[in-house]
Amino acid sequence: MYPQRYAEKGNNRGAIKFKGLFHLMVILGTAAAIVAPECCDCPDSCVCKWITGKMTAICISAGFTDVPSLSSDTQVLNLNSNNITYLKADAFGSAGLVNLQKIFIKHVTLREMHRDSFKNMTILVEINMSDNYLSSIPKGAFEGNVRLKILILSGNPLKILPSGQFPTLPCLRTLELESCQLQTIEDSFVNLNALEILNLKLNNLQSASKEIFANLTNLKSLALEGNPWRCDCELKIFRDWYLSSNLPSLSPICYQPEIFNQKLWTSIASEDFACLPKVQITNGDVVYKDVGENMTLSCNIVSNPEPVVLWLFNGVPIAIGVNESFTEDVSVEILIDGSVEKWSNLSIRELNEYNFGHFVCLAKSAVYLVEAKSLVSLPVEEDPPVVVKGHAFWFLFTGVSILGLVLFVLATSAVACGCMTYSRTNKIKKQDEKTGDPEKRLLDVSSSHSRKSSCEKLDSISGANESVDRFNSNLHLKRPDYGYVTAFPVFPVPPPEQFSNSMARSRTLGNVYQYGTKSRQYRSRPDVDQSSDVVCKARKCRGVGSKGSSSVFDVSVLPFATLPRKHFTGEYTSPITKYDNMGKRISVRGSSTMSFQDIPPPPPPPLSSKSDFEFVPL
């Protein structure tokens, strides 16, 4: 419109100049728009553009392990969700990014950083390093970042903030430390005088001190919710300061003690933020006193706030002031940490038998009730040691000597008896060794039978009934020159037990016989001489008849044995008998001989009216 107007007025020259200038400006603007992207030098994995008047490089999830090289005109750098585990010294200045104002390195698995990682970044105003794995931050890590206003470190497991953690940052307004697992905070904020917003939510803080925040004069918001606060005397001062500062935030919640669990700070009175009292009776657990003595029990209590002290005797409160026997002296001292040290001295005048027992010092607060006990007792009387003096010592010595002598005599007698017994045993053994085996066996057999009772003997020979029955009639032995003689029925004696081995017993034992029969009656024959030198030991024995008499006797057992007589040298001859293995034996007439095969057997007894058999008791 303007050129047409000028043309109408005839001012063609001015219209031409304005039109040319307009076209030139359009051409230059188009050239600048075409050339500008080439000058930024932006990597293919990043997006570089102007946002709110600032050149911004967006490199989210680009797979970088280090800070990339970009145009020096870049003012905002976003490296979120990469894999940068370590920030080296001068990490951004060495990449030519000296004009950065904002850096976002969130969620890049960052585990460690150098103290000079942000060196020479003088115009940096915001750093976001949240949601990484930094367990500590080097002291002085942000030194020189004098224009830094926002620092976000949330989501790193820092746990502890040591004293002087942050350097002097005169422009820092916001510090985010949420979910950093913080347990202890020292004087970490002493150089942050301009701090206005401090976020400490969702950590592990149980207690805090107001001195930590003493230099934060410009603080406007302090977030403390989400921490497991222990609401006791150590938190009391900080709680009172926090509630009186009117900082806009939600009221924290108590987790301990159990009585205050899930209660807001604002709902608990200041005096109820108390610590467990420490109570002790300094006299000890047991105090020994005699009747009539004076006594003082001292109870020491350290608590915050000051507790109420009570004394109990055997479970009953002591009415101090009412009972004149008891008096109390109390002293109180305030300690540096605000706790109270209290002494309660209970005095008892002239103890009697009713004042001995259990005393209890009881410290009571709004929350806790703690006690200490002490027992007052009479002294234990111990028996004095026994001291032997004078004549008593000699009596004791004499008694011990006599006892020792008696023991010596008894021991000597026992040894002597043992020696005598041993000597006698050896003597008997020697005599037994001199005695022949055949004779010994003969004596053993006879003695074993002689020791049995008549009934036992009868039972022992009951097995020989058949032999007795065969010889139950009078036997007539015919020998030349002697005629007939009558002999008693005989049966073989079983061998001794030591000569029997579960085999059938022999009917004879050599030529030794024992005479005996069952209980039977024998009538004397008028033509036979039945006289005999019989010694009867049976239960029924009425006598032995002589020739022509009628005598009845009952023989159960006759404990006799016959021994071979001397060899007969008359006209009687018989076949030579074999050796009967009995060895040497002694006859009733005192002779001794051996039974060999060349010696003839003994002749039969002569025929006379009197029997030649001799019976010898063993």
Image: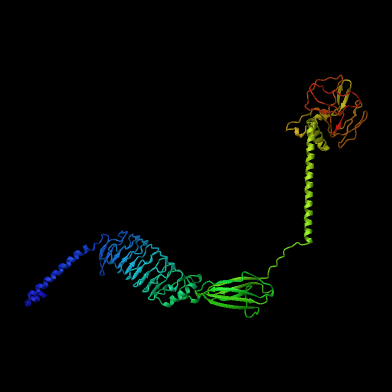
Placement of the N terminus among the 4 image quadrants: bottom left
293 and 398: which is toward the camera: 398
Is 87 on the left or on the right of 594, as rendered?
Answer: left
Taking the image as shown, residue 489 lies to the left or right of residue 214, namely right
Residue 67 image-quadrant placement: bottom left
Considering every residue shown, the one lying at the far front of the view is 390
Q: Is residue 458 visible?
A: no
Position of residue 463 in the picture relative to residue 44 (left or right): right
The colour scheme applied to this rendered structure is: rainbow
Q: Look at 17% across and 65% down and name the residue there.
A: 31
In this view of the protein, can residue 409 be seen by the observer?
yes
Residue 592 horizontal/vertical position (percent): 83, 27
Residue 61 locus on image (x, y percent): 31, 60
Quarter residue 192 falls in: bottom left
Residue lying furthest left in this view? 10
| Labels in figure, total | 0
Q: Residue furthest right?
A: 548
Expressed as whole percent of the image width and height from the top left, the position of residue 42 reads: 25, 62
Q: Is residue 64 above or below residue 521?
A: below
Residue sitting nearer the eye, 449 or 294: 294
The image shows residue 107 at horizontal and vertical percentages of 35, 62
Q: Which part of the image, by quadrant, shows the C terminus?
A: top right
Q: Is residue 486 above or below residue 1?
A: above
* Residue drawn where x is 10% and y is 72% of the image: 17
